[in-house]
Amino acid sequence: MTDIQLQPTQKQLQGTMSVPGDKSISHRSVIFSGLAEGTSHITNFLTGEDCLRTVEAFREMGVRIDQQDDRLTVYGRGIQGLKEPSSPLNFGNSGTTARLMSGILAGLPLFTTAFGDASLSKRPMDRVVVPLKQMGADITGRDENRLLPLAFRGRKLEGTVHELTVRSAQVKSALLLAGMLADGETKVVELGQTRNHTEMLLPEFGVNLNVEGAAITIEGGQQPQASDIKIPGDISSAAFFIVAASIVPGSDLIIKDVGLNATRDGIIQAMKKMGADIETDIHTYIGREPVGDVRVRSSRLKALQLDGELIPNLIDEIPIIALAATQAEGTTVIKDAEELKFKETDRIEAVVTTLTKLGAEVEATEDGMVIHGGASLTGGSVHSYGDHRIGMMGAVASLISAEPVTIQDKDCINISYPSFFEHLNEVLR
């Protein structure tokens, strides 16, 4: 594990920058290309460790994937051309890889085993395994099939209706992929809308599905066809710079070519409710995904209550929103966010512990936290908990701390944003 000590700075965030490709779309682009017939080209691919786990999984299944920087060429062999891996698939820390690949591995006529690192091995897989078993999947694993490692004895699945009990785009996507491989029709009914990149992207690969409100229906037996995909910038990565520019006095920052999908822009909605000075400009569409620029200027923030329907659209951004709330006027309450407990770490505990060590006043609740604004952060030594979003939150906190901030295990940031510190230094002026 590598630590980093960040010194206090009097600089502001100024100029123009871009963030790496969207993590969710990067995973899906590789998965759909790997299942497709023909050659697909992917540009602005996120080269973080999580997405590379998905690349390696398909390579192990016989798909040739060439990489040059952030460009991938995927030589798809079609669903029937995938081969049985000769060794267990290593999903590392990637929950997206683990859950989406489960939907595929359950429906292929192959035997596969898969495992993850210590963190991923604690994250619940039953939310995917149970509905897949309802389709006829043969999956076994630890703790009554709740945890990795898992073994998949792939077989032909039967389409069915799934009424989801958790708000999870990963679960939804896994079941839609299983449905694409199954006999008959599969319908997935969501509790509330989650990020919809799967529904937006599958048609680009020639796969038909029907979206009616909260219900998505897919017909089995479809074979994806190759497609070229350009991936927009990741709004979850941009979120750290949106908050940094909002809370560092004198900042004026433009973030170019960010994905502004309405199921992902909760960070912008939340920050605007806090009084942040943010302008967005959608200037193009990549496939069906809206893409635009985000301009952020420093401003005085006020507290808010975050709960209900907005939570699924910003669940990954709650750590950095919590940091913003420490600088707002008033007390911020975050509710309905129990899903934070099932991320790379228990993010409720990790956020509260980290911000408290840095001098903020924050209390954990069963499904969120209470954050008292107006804090003067003192600095200190904090642990990333192996969670990239906690590590980056600590780095942004250093910009407004009186004393240095040391982040233990900074390398976990490579999971989603390998160039984070380089980009941060470029815009500090």
Image (cartoon, rainbow, N blue to C red):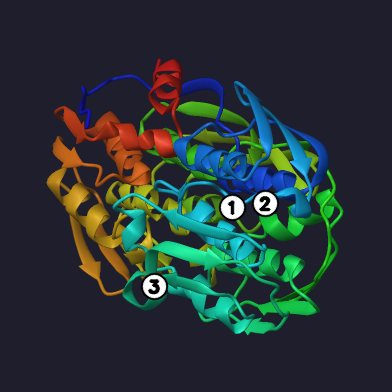
Quarter of the image where the N terminus is located: top left
Looking at the image, which residue is at 46% across and 37% down? 49
Q: Which mark is residue 366?
A: none
Q: Nearer the viewer, residue 91 or 227?
A: 91
Looking at the image, which residue is at 34% across and 70% down? 142
Instruction: Give the answer, above or below, for where 358 lies relative to 180.
Output: above
**Residue 268 position in % (x across, y down):** 54, 50
Residue type beneath disc 2: Asn
**Residue 118 position in % (x across, y down):** 29, 52
Taking the image as shown, residue 415 lies to the left or right of residue 176, namely left
Q: Nearer the viewer, residue 32 or 26?
A: 32
Looking at the image, which residue is at 74% across and 66% down? 181
Q: Which mark is residue 261?
A: 2
**Residue 291 position in % (x across, y down):** 71, 40
Residue type beneath disc 3: Arg
Look at mark 1 in the image and give the residue it sits on: 265
Taking the image as shown, residue 209 lies to the left or right of residue 333, namely right
Q: Are marks 2 and 1 in contact (CB under 8 Å)?
A: yes
SS label for mark 1: loop
Look at mark 3 in the image and give the residue it sits on: 146
**Nearer the observer, disc 3 or disc 2?**
3
